[in-house]
Image (spheres, rainbow, N blue to C red):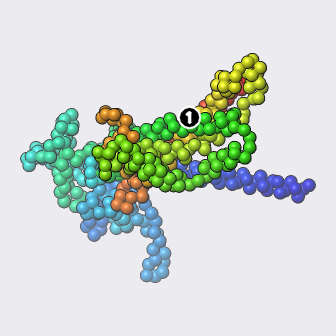
């Protein structure tokens, strides 16, 4: 008996340790995403470094690492290296530079240092020299240029169309750089900001991120088209998967005769839940895009051929592909709800003279409604985070058009669209983006994670609330 309890205790401790380890791993992953994602909009202080060899670098420090070195006598020492983002792609194409901290003669945080956020080309760090209007200098110096820029801000959208307006910056080493006003998104001086100004800047950056389109090849700007495209695809998928999944579950549980056929169908449904998502994408490409889309083009759009209309990737085919992917989730959730309906409810309904359909519609469906909504929300959560099948059925890195706009017929099911999950992949793993696009990838990951967690939390809360309501009603009956 002692030996048996020892083994049981060991198993309990092993299970508990595995649970704690898994929780810590998930918490660490979320912490990394939150720290890197939320810090993207906070204005970073610019530091001016002068090295002992005479070089001058302006930028903000992103990390400080220790490096062990060995001298001629064999003694080991620790040196530190600073990783600085320079905002000077002409001088540092990689945008980041490593500085030996021991070779820094002095450093300063000049209040006049500014960040110019460009529409294309990334951020530029420097000092405001002059404001130029059609070749004529109309303002010189930091204060004068900033004041003139603020005066033009109310008419900035109109003035941006005039390529003659520009701002002249000077880099840390004295070189001058001209930025066209048409390419200026925002100018701010982080070292001169107060705490309240930084908070306002942070909130404005977060708002712009959610409601503005991307710029500079998705490295900067917002993700509004990706959010809109993700929402439109999920809504379209839900409209299709919900009735099909619920009807299939009702047939399997209420109308189908138990036997080999139903067993095979249930095995197939459970097997679909374990199929890799890319397999659904290949099927969607071959069947939906090439076969159905090509057939629709030949029947309804012959004048547009050989240019395809529906015979290429689009939001409709992505939604139908995800219908196949999430259908098992809905069927299983609804079937579990049907299995939990007390048999006494059906028997009481039949005893009162209700038909089978009336019993199903008026008695069973209200009780199963929590499971139906749970299946819907879980399918939406899975669809929002799935990327692989969409990459080959209609998602693109950038699209200037939305699936829904003011052009007739207003809803364009044949259009390609942006998706938040693919946006993360594009910004985080593009070969030409470098490390400058990683903050955007972290922020988009945090946004997608928040959406998925919110949907799952809503599913759990809604299911518990409705089950409690109907269980109390059944107990009272």
In the visual, does 166 lie left or right of 344? left
Residue at the spot x=35%, y=46% of the render? 309
SS assignment at label 1: helix
Q: Decide which of 353, 198 is in the foreground and name it.
A: 353
Tell me: residue 392, above or below residue 300. Answer: below
Relative to 228, residue 291 above or below: below
Residue drawn at x 44%, y 47% is 292
Q: Which residue is mark 1?
A: 243
Q: Pick the residue in front: 305 or 385.
A: 305
Residue at 72 percent of width and 33 percent of height: 340
Q: Residue furthest left?
A: 136
Q: Residues within 10 Å of mark 1 (few under 14, many from 20)?
A: few
Decide if residue 163 is on the left or right side of residue 466.
left
**Residue 327 image point, x, y percent:** 57, 43
- Please say whether residue 386 is visible from this viewpoint: yes
On the rendered structure, is 358 left or right of 160?
Answer: right
Q: Quadrant of residue 247?
A: top right
Give percent across and percent down for residue 219: 35, 52
* Viewer-nearest residue: 36 or 114: 36
Whole-percent x and y of residue 165? 14, 45
Which residue reaches farthest bottom? 73
Residue closest to the far right = 1
In the figure, 64 relative to 389: above or below? Answer: below
Whether residue 109 is visible here, answered yes or no, is no
Q: Quadrant of the N terminus?
A: bottom right
Picture quarter with the C terminus: top right
Q: Residue at x 43, y 60 (%)?
A: 64
Q: Residue 14: percent from the left, percent from the top? A: 74, 56
């Amino acid at each position: 008996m002692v030996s048996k309890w020892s083994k049981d205790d060991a198993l309990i401790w092993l299970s508990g340790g595995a649970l704690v380890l898994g929780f810590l791993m998930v918490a660490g992953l979320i912490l990394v995403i939150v720290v890197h994602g939320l810090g993207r909009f906070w204005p970073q202080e610019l530091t001016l470094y002068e090295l002992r060899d005479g070089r001058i670098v302006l930028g903000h420090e992103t990390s400080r690492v220790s490096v062990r070195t060995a001298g001629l006598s064999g003694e080991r020492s620790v040196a530190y290296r600073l990783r600085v983002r320079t905002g000077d792609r002409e001088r540092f194409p990689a945008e980041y530079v490593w500085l030996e901290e021991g070779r820094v003669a002095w450093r300063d945080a000049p209040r006049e240092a500014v960040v110019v956020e460009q529409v294309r080309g990334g951020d530029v760090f420097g000092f405001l020299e002059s404001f130029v209007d059609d070749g004529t200098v109309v303002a010189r110096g930091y204060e004068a240029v900033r004041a003139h820029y603020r005066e033009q801000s109310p008419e900035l959208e109109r003035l941006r169309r005039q390529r003659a307006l520009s701002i002249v910056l000077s880099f840390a080493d004295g070189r001058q750089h001209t930025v066209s006003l048409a390419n200026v998104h925002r100018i701010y001086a982080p070292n001169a900001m107060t705490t309240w100004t930084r908070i306002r800047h942070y909130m404005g950056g977060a708002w712009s991120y959610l409601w503005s389109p991307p710029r500079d090849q998705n490295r900067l700007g917002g993700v509004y088209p990706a959010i809109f495209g993700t929402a439109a695809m999920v809504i379209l998928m839900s409209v299709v998967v919900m009735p099909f999944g619920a009807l299939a579950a009702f047939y399997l549980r209420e109308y189908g005769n138990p036997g080999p056929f139903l067993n095979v169908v249930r095995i197939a449904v459970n097997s679909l839940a374990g199929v890799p998502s890319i397999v659904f994408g290949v099927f969607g490409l071959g069947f939906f895009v090439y076969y159905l889309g090509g057939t629709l083009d030949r029947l309804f759009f012959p004048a547009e051929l050989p240019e395809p209309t529906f015979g290429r990737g689009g939001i409709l085919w992505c939604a139908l592909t995800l219908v196949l992917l999430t259908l098992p989730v809905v069927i299983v959730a609804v079937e579990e709800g049907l299995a939990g309906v007390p048999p006494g409810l059906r028997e009481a309904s039949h005893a009162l003279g209700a038909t089978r359909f009336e019993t199903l519609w008026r008695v069973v469906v209200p009780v199963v409604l929590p499971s139906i909504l749970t299946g819907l929300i879980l399918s939406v959560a899975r669809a929002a985070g799935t990327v692989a099948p969409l990459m080959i059925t209609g998602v693109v890195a950038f699209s200037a058009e939305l699936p829904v706009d003011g052009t007739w017929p207003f809803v364009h099911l044949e259009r390609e669209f942006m998706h938040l999950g693919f946006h993360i992949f594009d910004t985080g793993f593009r070969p030409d983006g470098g490390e400058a696009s990683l903050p955007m990838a972290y922020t988009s990951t945090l946004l997608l994670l928040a959406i998925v967690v919110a949907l799952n939390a809503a599913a759990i809360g809604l299911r518990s609330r409705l089950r409690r309501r109907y269980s109390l009603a059944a107990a009272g009956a």
